[in-house]
Amino acid sequence: MAILFIVLTVILGFYMAWNIGANDVANSMADAVGSGSCTIRQAVIAAGVCEFAGAVLVGAHVTDTVRKGIVEPNALASLPHMTEAQGAALLVIGMLSALLAAAMWLHIATFLGMPVSTTHSIVGAVAGFGVVAAGWSAVHWDKMGQIVLSWFISPILGGIMSFFLFKLISGIILGSDRPTRAATRYAPYLFFFTGLVVVLSIVFKGLNHLIAEDRLFWMTNSISFAIAVLLGIFMAIFSRLYLSKKLSLFFRVPLSEQLEKVERVFAPLVFITSCTVAFAHGANDVANAVGPLAAVAEILRSGNVYMKVHVPMWVLILGGCGIVTGLAMYGYRVMTTVGTKITVITPSRGLAADISAMTVVLICSRLKLPISTTHTLVGAILGVGFARGLGAVNKQVTRNIFGSWFITVPAAALLAILLFLAGRIFLMDQIADVIQSQALTG
Amino acid sequence: MSLLTKLFGASPFGPLLEHAQKVHSCVKLVIPIMEALRKEDYKEVRRLQDQVSKLEFEADEIKHNIRDNLSRRYLLPVSREDLDIYLHQQDSIADAVQDFAVISIIRRTRIHPELGENFLAFVAHIVSVGDTLLGAAEEMVNLAETSFKGAEARKVLSLIAGLGEQEWKADRMQRQLSIQIYEREKELDPITILFYEKILGALSEIANFAENTGDVLRRMIVKGR
């Protein structure tokens, strides 16, 4: 019987992940596809690999937050007039409702043509049912406050960082008398930084969720840092060799030709940074699909709500697979649309936006904060625009994006509440029995 | 549907280059018009004026297209007002060419044989001013690339300085031609002299507007420093 509910949650979680793959991933690779640095097929394959890697290697942190960081499990376990098992059942119903509500909202918003954030949806839905299930105190409002704050801060930070990054690129490389020479000399620093951030996000403070704790005892913080620095240097050397090989012939050609060559050579490098954005996206957004699943699985396995174990690996793998499947089946089509319309973002701009977005998203993931990767990327692109890097940005669309925030959270919460109330009436006792028996035998 | 596809609008710098090229194709026609005037081939002058009219109309269409899309945009590397003024000045070049063409057809003005060479030299110079401006306009795309700063901006600034010099030379040529015309005033009837002045006026307007266009471009670059 427990299996039934696990399977149901798995299906819903997979479905959410599928949606994320189908719609969101195109945005991660947008800069690469738009600047023509790879074919759609290459973008899809690379995105699939990187999203999966991000989900599995770094995804546990944010998944943990969605699982137990927003709604306090104990609050449901210790409700008056209810046994612990019934409280646990409520949590299961709630998480299921949240998943279903978020998935429904995704469809409604897409149907209405509104830009929608999967992160905002799931967080709103979880908080929604939490309030109804066990009152205001059931929700960790301090964490919620942090999360909502991060929704505002992440695009702004992405924008600020890309502003300065692009000012740097346009001043030192594009504005120089010899852009080709400047690119060969200075772009490797960008790649050092990129490699550093990606690796740090994986190894810093141990890969405890991936490998059993005692096996990695040698990986102290300083060793982790050293590994990250080493890999950053490796990326820098790679980019330096690549740039030298491609650009050294052009150190003395006329200025406009140099500029053109630099952009042309940056294009494949944008592919790499877009892959890191896809990696960051997988790390942060997989939680939207499997956070609730991780909660339900844990409750039904152990018979209680305390969620002491790490996020199980199979949950992350499932999420990763869902994302990749959605990407392969539908994301293909979305990427084609992206490709034809984003030719205005030249590689140097894409580089600045990607590196900034990736950094902000990975830092927030490690801080266990669920943020919207797409909005951070939009913020980064706008930052480049403010640094006078873009031809034109549609103001109406930017307004729509930020406006949709205010609708998504209430709408998803409302849906979740309705579903939760229905579930409580019909299913609570059945699930409570299941959990009771799990607790006795488990 | 991907959010990012809706985020971007088309950059105005490509169409601005198109406009510059269309205007320049107008400017180049002043040489064949002057030659036809010299040969007194008034049918040819008529035909060329039609061509100028058509090109000027096409330039207007590009201008309207840019203006329509410009209002919905944000976060440009330069201010929208400057781009508007630039476009206006560049379009006025084509208007001045049209003025010259119309002057050529409304009366069968005979070019005095001794003045013919100098008139031709004058129009050739006007066209070279247009060439220089086109060279600067062609750099617009590169300027957008470097955000109107750096080595590219310095290069365009020196191009524009050359433009100022050429316009000054055009003024001088116009003065000298006027002097030569009045040296022969006994041989020429008053209306012919009037039309010579009109022709010189329209031609130097072309150079003036070219210089103004360059000036606005210079302002766009310098403002952002």
Image (tube, coloured by chain):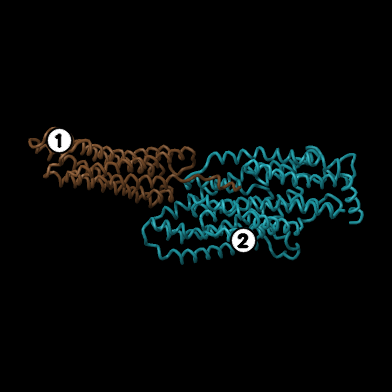
Q: Residue at x 61, y 55 (%)?
A: A332
- From what the image shows, is residue A237 above or below residue A145? below
Numbered tag placed on residue A355 in the rendering = none
Tag 2 and tag 1 share a subunit? no
Residue A238 percent across, percent down from the top left: 53, 65
> Which mark is nearer the camera, 2 or 1?
1
Q: Is residue A173 left or right of residue A220?
A: left
**In the figure, residue B94 lies in which quadrant?**
top left
The location of residue A324, given as percent across then percent down, is 67, 57
Report the chain holding disc 2: A
The residue closer to the viewer here, A348 or B30, is B30
User: At x 65% / y 47%, what residue is drawn?
Assistant: A371
Q: Secondary structure at mark 1?
A: helix
Q: Residue at x 39, y 58 (%)?
A: A257
| Rendered shade, chain B | brown
Q: Which residue is mark 2?
A: A45
From the viewer's perspective, is B119 left or right of A32? left
Expressed as whole percent of the image width and height from the top left, the position of residue B55 reads 33, 43
**Outermost residue toward the left in this view:** B186
**Which corner quadrant holds the C terminus of chain A?**
bottom right
- Crowd band around label 1 with a 10 angstrom C-alpha radius: few (<14), some (14–19), many (20+): some
Q: Is residue A285 above or below residue B37?
A: below
Kind of residue at disc 2: Ile
Label 2 residue SS? helix
Above or below residue A311? Residue B57 is above
Residue that numbered label 1 is attached to: B193
* Residue type, label 1: Ile
Res A50 seen here: yes
In this rendering, position of residue A37 left or right of residue A99: left
The answer to which quarter of the image holds residue B190 is top left
